[in-house]
């Protein structure tokens, strides 16, 4: 049995994994899907001081307090930054890193370095009345879907959980300076349908940091695959447990 720790992306909550959690549990695995500080039920804690480091502390704290080991650490979207710095702190507890349509940073990079599009959101937040808030979908052209979700009921459900993000999340750099983190195998899962214009991802190097060939899988769906293709996503994740 492995422990799957599912980390949501910007503006979402742990509730977004609602369709994946029971499927992984039915396969015999422990599943944890927390909500990061400042989102959902903790939106009242959001402030300009909340940033990437806050969310890394959330996940590192959960892993150590619950004494989790053999963790398949899954980061969606923005949470690719979160799982990277988390693994840097507790590499001995992580069995696999999964970048789920996620930002994949190098040491010292921020969100804007990984995805230059994020700089526009940073600039917009700094120039706003609050000086730090990034509302959902800020800077993203309106479209018929919501992160690739098109079913009206699913769109309404997704909107019900969304809340603002602090600009500090996109400004703070990732720490990947622990040599031990390089030994952790990685898998990249790319959502390849309904990709918004201007959203480009870096090519995945042919060789992982641990020296093994890169493992890249694709899902023919939009960004929020945990909503639109929970079964197919679970099938891929189970292969790693």
Image (cartoon, rainbow, N blue to C red):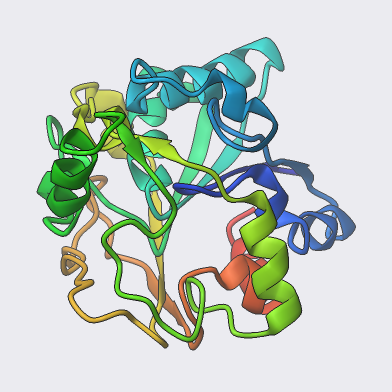
Q: Is residue 122 left or right of residue 96?
A: left
When asked about the image quadrant of residue 183, the answer is: top left
Residue 7 in view: yes
Name of the residue lying farthest toward the top: 65
Horizontal and vertical percent position of residue 129: 27, 33
When asked about the image quadrant of residue 176, the answer is: top left
Q: Is residue 142 left or right of residue 58?
A: left
* Quadrant location, the N terminus: top right
Give the residue at x 71% y 17%: 66
Residue 114 in view: no
Give the residue at x 30% y 67%: 140
Give the residue at x 68% y 84%: 151
In this view, the residue in front, 70 or 172, is: 172
Name of the residue lying farthest toward the right: 26
Horizontal and vertical percent position of residue 50: 39, 20
Image height of 9 relative to 166, above or below: below
Name of the residue lying farthest toward the front: 129
Give the residue at x 38% y 83%: 192
Image height of 67 relative to 29, above or below: above
When asked about the image quadrant of residue 207, the answer is: bottom left
């Amino acid at each position: 049995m492995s422990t799957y720790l599912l980390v949501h992306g910007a503006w979402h909550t742990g509730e977004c994994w609602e369709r994946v959690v029971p499927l992984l549990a039915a396969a015999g695995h422990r599943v944890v899907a927390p909500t990061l500080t400042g989102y959902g039920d903790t939106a009242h804690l959001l402030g300009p001081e909340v940033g990437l480091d806050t969310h890394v502390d959330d996940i590192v704290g959960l892993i150590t307090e619950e004494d989790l080991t053999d963790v398949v650490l899954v980061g969606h979207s923005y949470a690719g930054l979160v799982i990277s710095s988390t693994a840097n702190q507790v590499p001995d507890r992580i069995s696999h890193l999964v970048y789920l349509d996620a930002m994949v940073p190098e040491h010292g990079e921020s969100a804007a370095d990984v995805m230059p599009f994020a700089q526009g959101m940073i600039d917009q937040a700094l120039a706003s009345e609050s000086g730090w808030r990034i509302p959902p979908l800020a800077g993203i052209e309106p479209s018929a879907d919501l992160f690739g979700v098109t079913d009206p009921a699913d769109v309404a459900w997704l909107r019900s959980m969304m809340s603002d993000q602090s600009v500090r999340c996109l400004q703070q750099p990732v720490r990947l300076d622990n040599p031990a983190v390089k030994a952790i195998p990685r898998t990249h899962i790319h959502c390849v349908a309904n990709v918004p214009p201007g959203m480009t991802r870096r090519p995945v190097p042919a060789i992982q940091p641990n020296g093994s060939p890169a493992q890249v899988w694709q899902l023919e769906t939009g960004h929020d695959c945990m909503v639109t293709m929970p079964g197919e996503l679970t099938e891929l994740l189970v292969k790693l447990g």
